[in-house]
Amino acid sequence: MHSLSNLDDFELMTLLKADHELAFAEIFRRFDSLLYIYAYKKLQNTEEAKDVVQEVFVQLWNARKDFVLKTTLPGYLYKAVLNKILNIIARKQSETKYIASLQHAINSDMVSADFLIREKDIRALIEKEIAALPKKMREVFELRKNHYLSNKEIALQLNISEQTVETHMKRALKILRNKLGVLIYLCYLL
């Protein structure tokens, strides 16, 4: 088979739609670094930039069968990265507003009905995201956070290794942090 590096973007997308993993790898090779640099310039955060680019490539792979390229491939990829960056910025602005509101409530030592409603809404959002975790990961997370069990105790109860418990906790926290950001940590502090 001839080298995929000689193919244009349209040809690579055609192969990608046919589940050609090497075509995906070639697209990733061509655009990963460029997209990372673009994301980093906007976010000024290495991990967030990496996560954004990874999410875009995962999204591309998952949608490959039904994907319709209405523009150029680089145009699509840059726009997808930009949209994810804008979502992060919007989430951070919401978190900043919430933190400022929380600080005001703490400083004034008044617990208003509005604050209690927002806290309840955030707790409900956190519970919803916890419930959406994969079953075993959710069990590990709930045993740690609700029952205060150690890794060893959880491992014994679920008949899994302590390393698996630790891995489930790390992944659960990463998923929740990505979906909820700072909010999860604030609620656990309250």
Image (cartoon, rainbow, N blue to C red):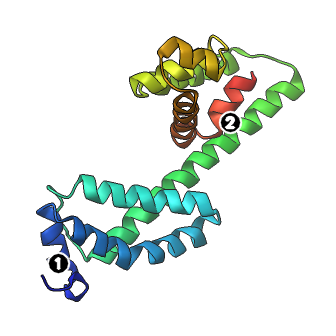
Which disc number belongs to residue 108?
none
Circle 2 Cα neighbour tier, 10 Å, few/some/many (<14 / 14–19 / ≥20): some
Would you name the residue on which mark 1 appears? 10
Where residue 138 appears, x then y in whole percent? 48, 22
Label 1 secondary element:
helix
- Residue 94 figure quarter: top right
Disc 2 or 1, which lies upstream in sequence? 1
Is residue 142 something that shows in the picture?
Answer: no
Where residue 108 appears, x then y in whole percent? 88, 25
Is residue 35 something that shows in the picture?
Answer: yes
The three-letter amino acid code for the residue at tag 1 is Phe
The three-letter amino acid code for the residue at tag 2 is Tyr
Q: Quadrant of the C terminus?
A: top right
Label 2 secondary element:
helix
- Between residues 76 and 166, which one lies in front from this camera angle? 166
Name the residue rendered at 38%, 63% in the picture: 80
Whether residue 188 sits left or right of residue 174 in the image: it is right
Which disc number belongs to residue 98?
2
